Image: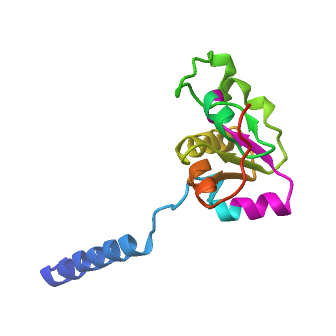
Amino acid sequence: MNKQNLTYLVLFFVILGVVLIFVSKPETSPSGFETVSVDEAREMLEKDDFFLLDVRTPVEFNESHIEGAVLIPLENGYGSNLGPDQLLEARINEVPKGEKILVYCRTGRRSAVASQMLADAGYTDVYNMGGGINEWMAAGYPVVTGP
């Protein structure tokens, strides 16, 4: 192979690499679930039946929660000291398969983890409410206060 052909071959691979970098785009959301805004979540709850899963702690839930939510905490914190058998990982079978599931927490971080956990366990139609109950209340949507 002469020097000119080698130059063309190297140039070809450089251009191919640049094209692949610009054409391939990173996945914008974790696989298996979709993150929705609080406005989308409210609309979804008004239009369809959902299993509404609150993954915060009992203390947080008792302060305020969305009506109809089922509490299954993801982890300890915020004044709770739950046993491992009381957390979502051990109680995942309490979440009905075959139903649409909307998951929320305080800010959206824990609910994203819980949504991925559900998706990994084979659940479909899982939605994470981005911004959590903080954004829900900031939007003026109703909550239940007290236990």
Tell me: 139 left or right of 4. Answer: right
Indicate yes or no whether the magenta region holds residue 51: yes
Quadrant location of the N terminus? bottom left
Residue at 22 percent of width and 75 percent of height: 10
Specify start and end residues of the magenta stretch as a single range: 41-58
Q: Quadrant of residue 69?
A: top right
In the image, is residue 3 above or below residue 139?
below
* 1 drawn magenta: no
In the rendered view, tell whether residue 41 sits above or below residue 24. above
Residue found at x 84% / y 63%: 47
Q: Is residue 2 above or below residue 30?
A: below
Q: Quadrant of residue 13?
A: bottom left
Q: Relative to 23, is 75 on the left or the right?
A: right
Q: Nearer the viewer, residue 142 or 26?
A: 142
Quadrant of residue 131 within the rendered picture: bottom right
Which residue sits furthest left?
3
Residue 46 pos. (x, y %): 82, 61
Q: How is the image coloured?
A: rainbow
Image coordinates of residue 45 in percent, x first then y, are 79, 57
Q: Is residue 38 visible?
A: yes
Say if residue 122 shows up in the picture. no
Between 118 and 69, which is closer to the camera in this rendering? 69
For residue 79, side relative to residue 33 (left or right): left
Position of residue 77 in the picture relative to residue 124 (left or right):
left
The C terminus - image quarter: top right
Q: Nearer the viewer, residue 39 or 48?
A: 39
- Name the residue rendered at 60%, 53% in the picture: 31
**Residue 72 location (% of width, % of height):** 70, 31
Q: Going by the picture, which residue comes out furthest to the front?
A: 146
Residue at the image point whose x is 71% and y is 40% from the top: 145
